[in-house]
Every structure is written in structure tokens, then in C-alpha cells.
Image (cartoon, grey):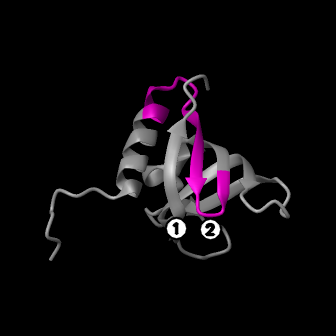
Amino acid sequence: MDPNPNRFRLSDTLFTTIRASVETNPLGERRVVLYTSFGVVRGTVSASAFGESNRMPDSRLENTSRVIIDPDILELEKVEIEHYSNHLPTAFFDRLFVRLEGVQGFAIDPKR
């Protein structure tokens, strides 16, 4: 039993903050910066990263199976990663799934 039942996880706070920010943005997306254990991750979170919209039909299956993304994983688009290790170059990805266990802090770009 958790001795502090009112304690919130960073992932809960991150999702709540990003969801509110995305829902209030007319474009339905928001640029975020995640400070992770491996580097600084910059990317776009869209409304499709939340709720029922993250369940994609798989046309290869006969039934209507869905892929459900774990609530502790955040999907980012148009991603840039600045690695903390100098020997690794900056990486760019169209889409990246970040496990929030490794996120140590976050920021939302208010201009985008």
C-alpha cells in the first residue's frame, strides 16, 4: 500500500499538462521538450496521442484488433534528440515513442 495515496507520478502530470495544452491549441498539437536520461528530446505531440485515437486498426488481421499504446509511453512526431554523450550525433526521427520512466523534466513551447 502506498503510504501517500495523493502522490502523483511525473507521467500523470506530464500527460495531464500536455493533453490540456494540445486541447486548447487550435492546431491540435504542441511542441514539447523532454529532459530524459539519454538526452534532450524535442518533438510534437498531437491529439492522436491521447484516448481512443491512439488505437489504430490493423488491416492485416481478420477482426478489429487494436494496438493500444501503454499509458506510460508518449508518442512524439518530428523529433530531434540531442544526446548527452558527445560521441553521438543529434538524431532525427519522424516518430518516436518515449517511455516516461526515463523523463526527468519537461517543458511546453508556448509559441507552437
Q: Which residues are magenta?
A: 21-40
Picture quarter containing residue 9? bottom left
Q: Is residue 68 visible?
A: no
Q: Is residue 22 magenta?
A: yes
User: Going 49% across and 50% down the picture, which residue do you hit?
Assistant: 105
Residue sticking out furthest to the front:
86
- The circle on residue 66 is 1
Callouts 1 and 2 close, C-beta under 8 Å: yes
Pinpoint residue 91: horizontal percent, then vertical percent. Answer: 81, 55
Q: Is residue 103 above or below residue 65?
A: above
Q: Which residue is mark 2?
A: 58
Image vertical order of residue 24 relative to residue 84, above or below? above
User: Which is more toward the observer, 58 or 14?
Assistant: 14
Image quarter in which the N terminus is found: bottom left
Residue type for callout 2: Asp
Kind of residue at disc 1: Arg
User: Is residue 32 inside the magenta stretch?
Assistant: yes
Q: Nearer the viewer, residue 4 or 54?
A: 4
CA separation, marks 1 and 2?
6 Å
**Residue 56 relative to residue 1: left or right:** right
